Amino acid sequence: MEEKIPVIIRMDKEKFTPENFKLKLKQLNLKHQDIIYAQAILETNNFTSNIFKNNNNLFGMKCAKQRPTIHIGENLGHAQYRTWEDCLIDYALWQTSYAKGLNENEYFTLLDKMYAENSEYVAKLKNIIKHYE
């Protein structure tokens, strides 16, 4: 019997727009999409930061060492990705590794303890969410 090998076909990268980003969040079925969108706005200074532009890094993520990752290297002290979609897939890997099954409050607590470098991080996220509701 011939062994079947799964194949992943990657299409050309889509242009980044906030609308495409939100669509990809839905396609990936990520939990807490409003929080993730707010994180991207905050971490990229509304999608204008050098780390986003040069690294396709939407979340200021560092190179993962203890979980699966698809980053292609490090640049500017942060993980670098082939596309912004790859960064979002890597965030999904982070979420699956550390935040699976958390409710919104637990997710904010995790971000505050594990992700944030600023004590006002969660408050800033909540403010962004209110602004975009």
Image (spheres, rainbow, N blue to C red):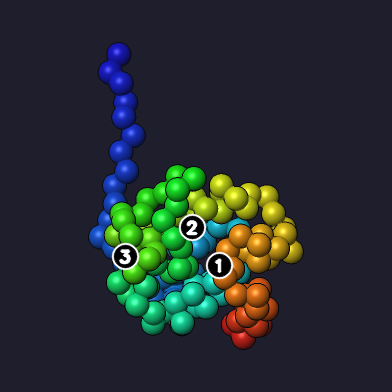
Q: Earlier in the sequence, mark 2 or mark 3?
A: 3
Could you tell me the amino acid type at mark 1? Ile
- The image position of residue 74, as x and y in percent, is 33, 60
Q: Earlier in the sequence, mark 1 or mark 2?
A: 1
Q: Answer with left or right where residue 21 lies relative to residue 72.
A: right
State left or right for residue 114 relative to residue 18. right
- The residue indicated by pointer 2 is 91
Q: Quadrant of residue 104?
A: bottom right
Frontmost residue, 26 versus 16: 16
How far apart marks 2 and 3 lie (CA) works out to: 17 Å
Q: Are marks 2 and 3 in contact (CB under 8 Å)?
A: no
Q: Nearer the viewer, residue 99 or 121?
A: 121
Relative vertical location of residue 11 with respect to residue 16 in this rendering, above or below: above
For disc 3, the marked residue is 75
The local secondary structure at tag 2 comes to helix
Residue at the spot x=32%, y=75% of the render? 53
Let me know if residue 133 appears in the view: no
Tell me the quadrant of the picture where the C terminus can be found: bottom right
Q: Secondary structure at mark 3?
A: strand
- Label 1 environment density (alpha carbons within 10 Å; few <14, some 14–19, many ≥20): many
Q: Residue 36: which disc? A: 1
Q: CA distance from mark 1 to mark 2?
A: 9 Å
Find residue 76 and report its horizontal and vertical position in percent. Answer: 34, 69
Image coords of residue 59 (percent x, y): 47, 68
Residue at 31%, 54% (x, y): give it. Answer: 72
Task: Please indicate, yes or no, whether residue 100 appears anywhere in the rendered image.
Answer: yes
Q: Find out whether the residues at labels 1 and 2 contact each other: C-beta distance under 8 Å.
A: yes
